[in-house]
Image: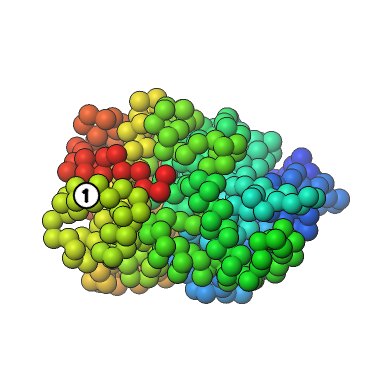
Amino acid sequence: MTTDVASLLVPTATGLVRGIVADGVRTWRGIPYAAPPVGDLRLRAPRPPERWNGVLNGSSFGAAPPQSRNPSLTGFRRRAPMDEDCLTLNVSAPLEPAAERLPVLVYFYGGAFSSGSSTVKTYRGSHLVRTGEAVYVSLNYRIGALGFMDFSSFSAAGRTFDSNLGLRDQVAALEWVRDNIAGFGGDPDNVTIFGESAGGISVTSLMCIPAARGLFHQAYAQSAAPSSAYSLELHAAWARDLLEILNVPLADAAEALSVLPAEALVRATNRLTSKIGPADKPGSLSVSPVVDGDFLPEHPIDTFKKGQAAPVPLVLGTMAREGALFAKIVDILPSTPDRIEKMFAGTDPDAQARVLAAYPGYPSKERSVEISGDLVFWYPSTMVAESHSLVAPTWSYRYDFATPMMNLLGFGATHAMDVPVMFGETREPITRALSLLGGGGTLRELSARFQGTLLSLAKTGSPGDDWPRYEPVQRRTRIFDREDRIELDPFPERREAWSGYRGYL
């Protein structure tokens, strides 16, 4: 099969872009969807990109947003280009143009809003495109202090700082998709957004952002933490903490934030999110969306509860052992008794006895880890599913499968292990290593089913006829395992114990 060279040259609103053929798909990389957020545009809402002359070479990914270069679960490469000028996206389409416009999949990466990049090999989406006859879009959005800390309270004459910059970037990218994706063979009237972890939070947050209305038509949230959005006051306190780490007087904040090297902001943010934040307010995420009363008018949990989130079909779910990864590798959750009890003391002391009683064996390490995962991921997702099911089709899942190696290492079906499974990348080094003791074949079979639910949602508005909708009475939930099954109201005792708990909201 020979790809028509002309099909690699695509016009966009800002100029021509030439793609390449890679991994069995046509792909266009590093396309600017917004102006570089540098100079006077640092810490400002994204602006439209400028037109370019000639043809943009779409063979290389754009620079990743500033972040730590330490090895991470996101797969970010040590030598990958990194720059504040990072607002680019990538499009992949089948080798042969289709007769009709194809469904569009738009992915938001995870990484606790502190790490991540669309350059990660797992996120390239070629398997989704080859298997599902879809057009796939991945993008970079600002992270860390430059994307998810709110410095608006430090705005000064002639220097304004905007809020929710990373989410604003995502909206700008979706606007680009609306305006340009038809040229790549995609249907702008059939866009499905999906993401994992911080990307899942992005999905549920975008459903509550007025500026995002109409820009997507289905949503799939993996391991979202929908409660991880906080008030202006709390974000302002975290911003002051960051300035203190940087030794910047509050009176000099506006000037300093305009000129400080990105590397300094990254180092300070890492210290805040890994040390100060978890110790001070266990269970919170200091680099996160802010309820600013404007772009994000109210907390997403409240928007969903009122039935005012975007009424689009939604699939969401969590891993069986979300907290295990964090307890062993990324120590930011309240997965120890002292953090758990400090969290309740600072949020809702009356809830402590009720919740802990639902985890027999507490304060064992195992029960503490379960509490942390349920607090951050499972229970908030249950609240969203319950509320959204009253206004739009909603499906809930739990991912239970773990290879023998994952169980031996003490992880089980933990956070982020479903990402390569969703993308069909089950032969990559990490998944091969986790299958050394067996389970590789089962993982590949599960990948086809798991990925199939996303493709079905994109094509038909439903993840499949064999998956009943979630509703607040029976709470039917699909369990992804060696053999999938439907369970009614998993863990009702835990759900009822957490009922009414609002954390730092």
Residue drawn at the location 25% of the way across and 64% of the way down: 337
Residue drawn at the location 45% of the way across and 69% of the way down: 275
Q: Where is residue 121 in the image (x, y as percent from the top left)?
A: 53, 62
Image: 396 above or below 444: above
Say left or right for 371 vs 74. left
Q: Which quadrant is home to the C terminus?
A: top left
Q: Place residue 21 in its image quadrant.
A: bottom right
Q: Can residue 16 be seen in this view?
A: no
Query: Farthest residue in the left direction?
Result: 360
Q: Which of 398 and 20 is in front in this view?
A: 398
Residue drawn at the location 33% of the way across and 38% of the way down: 383
Image: 22 above or below 224: below
Residue drawn at the location 36% of the way across and 31% of the way down: 387
Q: Where is residue 195 in the image (x, y as percent from the top left)?
A: 47, 49
Q: Position of residue 204 (x, y in %)?
A: 46, 41
For disc 1, the neighbor class at 10 Å (few under 14, some 14 to 19, many from 20) is some
Q: Place residue 140 in its image quadrant.
A: bottom right
Q: Nearer the viewer, residue 245 or 97?
A: 245
Say left or right for 493 vs 472. left
Mark 1 residue type: Val
Say left or right for 131 vs 336. right
Residue carrying label 1: 355
Q: Which of 363 and 324 is in front in this view?
A: 363
Label 1 element class: helix
Q: Where is residue 188 in the image (x, y as percent from the top left)?
A: 61, 33
Query: Farthest residue in the right direction?
Result: 53
Q: Can residue 348 be seen in this view?
A: yes
